[in-house]
Amino acid sequence: MEILVASSIGVLTAGGVYLLLRLRTFPVILGLALLSYAVNVFLFASGGLAIDQSPILSKYGDATYTDPLPQALVLTAIVISFGMTAVLVMIGLGAYLEADSDRIDIAAQDIEDTDDTDQTEPEGRA
């Protein structure tokens, strides 16, 4: 069970980092979402992987229980990551509508294009 959870955290992290390095807005947002899922699974697994155990102490003297704190942290992290994803989608949509492109490095590309045109002399002047 631990191998499966650890490998899924690794796959989510690797996919998130790969998508973060893309030059388009939407894959970067998906990469951030995958990284947040990886952190959520990691936080959930830090509470201990136990099956059919209660999150609180039992009155019957059963001493086995799972820690409820990571579950509360994951629930809070899910809500925060959903809100941040919505904000990033709106920022990305606004940038796309403003620049007519979803490339992330559009400003650097425009600066390079203007530098190339400024260095050439107009025709007719010597």
Image (cartoon, rainbow, N blue to C red):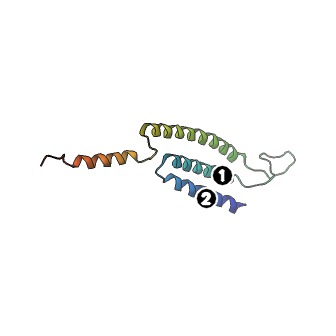
Residue lying at 48% horizontally and 53% vertically, measured from the top left: 22
Query: 18 or 125: which is nearer to us?
Result: 125
In the image, taking residue 126 as reference, residue 77 lies left or right, namely right
In the image, taking residue 94 as reference, residue 77 lies left or right, namely right
Q: Residue 36, position in %: x, y?
A: 59, 48
- The three-letter code of the residue at mark 2 reads Val
Q: Residue 54, position in %: x, y?
A: 80, 48
Q: Is residue 10 above or below residue 58?
A: below
- The three-letter code of the residue at mark 1 reads Val
Q: Which residue was labeled with disc 2?
A: 11
Q: Secondary structure at mark 2?
A: helix
Residue placed farthest to the bottom in the image? 3
Q: Which residue was labeled with disc 1?
A: 41
Residue lying at 58% horizontally and 51% vertically, measured from the top left: 35
Instruction: State which mark lies toward you, 1 or 2.
Output: 2
Residue placed farthest to the front in the image? 124
Do the CB atoms of the residues marked 1 and 2 lie less than 8 Å apart?
no
Instruction: Report, in whole angstroms, how far the alpha carbon at label 1 lies from the one at label 2.
Output: 12 Å
Query: 64 or 20: which is nearer to us?
Result: 20
Residue lying at 62% horizontally and 43% vertically, measured from the top left: 77
Q: Secondary structure at mark 1?
A: helix
Task: Specify the quadrant that holds the N terminus.
Answer: bottom right
- Give the number of marks: 2
Name the image quarter holding residue 72: top right
Q: Earlier in the sequence, mark 1 or mark 2?
A: 2
Q: Residue 116, position in %: x, y?
A: 27, 50
Residue lying at 81% horizontally and 52% vertically, measured from the top left: 52
In the image, taking residue 61 as reference, residue 33 lies left or right, namely left
Q: Residues within 10 Å of mark 2 (few under 14, many from 20)?
A: some
Q: Residue 13 shows which numbered tag?
A: none
Q: Residues within 10 Å of mark 1 (few under 14, many from 20)?
A: some
